[in-house]
Image (cartoon, rainbow, N blue to C red):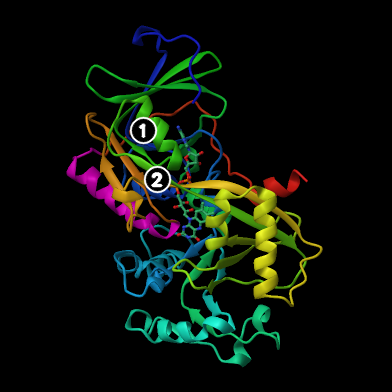
Amino acid sequence: MNHPANRDDHSQIEERVHLDVAVIGGGIAGLWLMNRLQQDGFCCALFEKNQLGSDQTLASQGMIHGGIKYTLAGSLSKASESIADMPAYWTRCLAGEGDVDLRGAKTLSRHFYFWSTDGISSRMSTFFASKAVQGRMDKVPRSDYPDLLKHPDFSGQVYKLQDIVLDTPSVISTLRGKVKEQVFSLADSEYEWRRNKENQAELLVIREGKRLLIQAKQFVFTAGKGNGPLLEALSISKPQMQLRPVHQVWVKHDLPYEFYGHCLGADTTPRISISTHSTTDGKRVWSLGGSVAEAGVKQSPEELIASAKRELCELLPWVDLSNAEWTTRRIDRAEARQRNFLRPDKAFAKSAEGIDNVIVGWPTKLTLTPNLANEVMELLSTLKVPHTTNCPAIDLPQAELSATPWDQEFSHG
Ligand SMILES: Cc1cc2nc3c(=O)[nH]c(=O)nc-3n(C[C@H](O)[C@H](O)[C@H](O)COP(=O)(O)OP(=O)(O)OC[C@H]3O[C@@H](n4cnc5c(N)ncnc54)[C@H](O)[C@@H]3O)c2cc1C
């Protein structure tokens, strides 16, 4: 966090801005929420410290899933129950018929695959015959296999889920489009969080020597892992955050395979999850998640790349990645803290304790972002936050979209 050079009292503030709702953090959670707030007539603005989508959102695999992968553990968990309706929810938004208009966003795929290797096919058959997944995925006949798995040496099974994969840069750009005049960058400013005499949070921003005090009926923190330092800066002890690190692998190549799917292994996490994205120079990037990325947390980039290569060579020996470029990045998934560090199974939004105007939110997953926004809207209604018609102009630059992390990583050569 940037700190103003000279702390001072309110007498030196040149301008005050009063908002109904100020959203802090411009990943998918903050931008989705801004769309809802603006449609609802709130006087609102979003403040982003880097660039929009720059942390988890653009690094994600963009899979909007109905939770089937959580049923790998054998039973329908709470996580898969609360998430089951989400692909349909997003599909309505993509068609312009939902609570947020996502018609400008690009769908990368309208389904993704589950595939098994030969050795665990019987486990896969049992899993797919189970009640939890019946009617939610179909066995794919060999003639319809995706190109990547069409090779004669492939002898596993393939199932198809009716879930979707989105191009997250286009989602972020579409969400920004509707609200961009109210989405501001703090990147070139110094700023400081304060608690005033009324026990309310306020944000002091200093830019080009000018001091601007931002006050809001409610601040909503949607800053991902940035929520932790924000809570600390305001001495808020609850809610608390937990971080779940992954070490993601990106492979840039010229191969024709646009593939989206999970390989089922012996574990309850997919052995590897592959999604396909594009680079600005027109190439393909595979993002490799699942157990590979989770185990990779304990590995150096070189060790992880070596193990990802081994894994792909074992699973897809006919795929020649000898000319591919490889890179990795460590990313923390930020969530509300759970007992025993369990994975939360829904979006989290709650008023912070001991302060009067802060709501804290984590969507937990891209997929659950609409749930987070619904919960915040409900909280604002319970708190009777008014809708002010004359919204003040804010003299700060608009926040820009971030480049994708793979474009950033590969451009470093
Ligand atoms: C590798 C990976 C793959 C994933 N794949 C999937 C998937 O396929 N499907 C799925 O459903 N979920 C997936 N997820 C999870 C999903 O990406 C996240 O749950 C979601 O993007 C979180 O969005 P967010 O807006 O809360 O946070 P973020 O995207 O992290 O955004 C937070 C924003 O707040 C800003 N910020 C931070 N501190 C401050 C501050 N003090 N002031 C102002 N701004 C601040 C940051 O710069 C950032 O722009 C994945 C996550 C990872 C890491």
Determine whether the residue tagged by mark 2 lies in a helix, strand or loop. helix
Residue 34 numbered mark, or none: 2
- Residue placed at 43% from the left, 40% from the top? 223
Residue 351 in view? yes
Q: As shown in the figure, which amino acid type bears the numbered disc 1? A: Cys
* Count of numbered labels shown in the rendering: 2
**x%, y% of residue 25?**
45, 39
Precedes in sequence: disc 2 or disc 1: 2
**x%, y% of residue 352?**
26, 36
* Alpha carbon separation for disc pair 2 and 1: 14 Å
- Residue placed at 54% from the left, 30% from the top? 397
360 or 156, nearer to the observer: 156
- Residue placed at 39% from the left, 87% from the top? 129
Residue 391 numbered mark, or none: 1
Which residues, given as a range, are shown in magenta?
366-386
Compared to 63, does 340 lie above or below? above
**x%, y% of residue 178?**
47, 49
Compared to 159, does 287 lie above or below? above
Q: Main secondary structure of the magenta part?
A: helix
* Category of crowding for the residue at label 2, using alpha-carbon neighbours closer than 10 angstroms: few (below 14), some (14–19), many (at least 20): many
